Image (spheres, grey):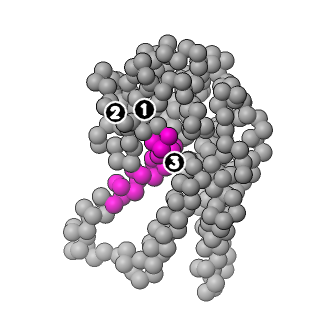
Amino acid sequence: MNGIFPIAVSIVLALYSWHNVSWRLQRNPELKGGYLRLLMLWLLWINSGFLFRLLPENPLTAYIVWLPIALIAIWILGLGGANFLQSYPGILFIPVGSARRIRFYTVLYLVVTLLLSAMREFDLLHWRQNDFVLPFPLIFVAMWFGVSFALAAFSGWQWLSENYPLKGKFPGNNSGWISGNMCGVTFRSCLVVAGDDAGFYMRMTLLFRLGHPPLFIPWSDIVAAPRRILWWDSTVLEFRKSPGVLLSLSPEDFAPFLSRIKGNHDPSGILDSKNNPRHNVA
């Protein structure tokens, strides 16, 4: 039973990822094959550690575990994998952004994984009870930094900040403490949004702003459409310079801004792919 549980969880997460991208597939059905291949690769990667634990114990097993990590790193860094992932965003635990940024996150992942492996090998992760009080604040700060930047990468916020950085002041007449979802990452009661004649503004509340720079997006770069998820209605936004990054807000929270993008509102719920160019697979 313990062996089936992690595989079952990974399948549920894969189905959730498929649900996230299904809305995009409605207007770009040619992406279906690529997303299916990516999900199969994702399932193999996410379960690789567990599957290798089933192997008989021998000195080579510890090195075999690194094989899928090495193969995926080679694919991303040298065989066009970063360009492929750029064109198929929205899968959980895979950074969303440009190919250059995806390569950067891959190198960072390798460095952190190797560092943790070395610390485990030399027993540096074991803290005696009397020593734990001192390093705990440092561990907490490091985890806060790591989680904040990871969420920014997985949600696509970092990619939006590259294409839509806020260069002026954030408007004072804003709506704060609202919730939203970006590429499967939920921001619960921590978003601040505003709008004027020029465009749409968004930032995080102060406590969660690390790794999430404020954004300014012109209205001409936003396409909105309604979407129903089970029993909940939402308004989904997509952005021309960051195709595939979908922001879901409640209709009530986005209602004050809907009239400003009347020309880009798609009441059918399927965004027009001609108005939302995607990156081609290299």
Question: Residue 269 at what x, y percent from top left?
Answer: 64, 21
Which element is circle 3 on? helix
* Residue 168, label in figure: 2
Q: Amino acid at mark 3?
A: Phe
* Residue 154, label in figure: 3
Residue 180 lies within the magenta run: no
For the point 66% across and 65% down, the residue is 78
Whether tag 1 and tag 2 are in contact, CB under 8 A, the answer is yes
* Residue 216, label in figure: 1
Question: Do we see residue 113 in this rendering?
Answer: yes
Cα distance, mark 1 to mark 3? 20 Å
Q: Nearer the viewer, residue 86 or 182?
A: 86
* Residue 17, label in figure: none
Q: Nearer the viewer, residue 257 or 15?
A: 257
Q: Which numbered mark, 1 or 2, is in the foreground of this view?
A: 2
Task: Decide which of tag 2 and tag 3 comes sooner along the chain.
Answer: 3
Which element is circle 2 on? loop
Is 225 positioned to the left or the right of 199 in the image? right
Relative to residue 258, is residue 274 depicted above or below? Answer: below
Q: Amino acid at mark 2?
A: Gly
Q: Which numbered mark, 1 or 3, is in the foreground of this view?
A: 1
Task: Decide which of tag 1 and tag 3 comes sooner along the chain.
Answer: 3
For the point 39% across and 36% down, the residue is 166
Question: Residue 49 at what x, y percent from top left?
Answer: 60, 67
Q: Amino acid at mark 1?
A: Phe
Q: Which residues are magenta?
A: 142-163
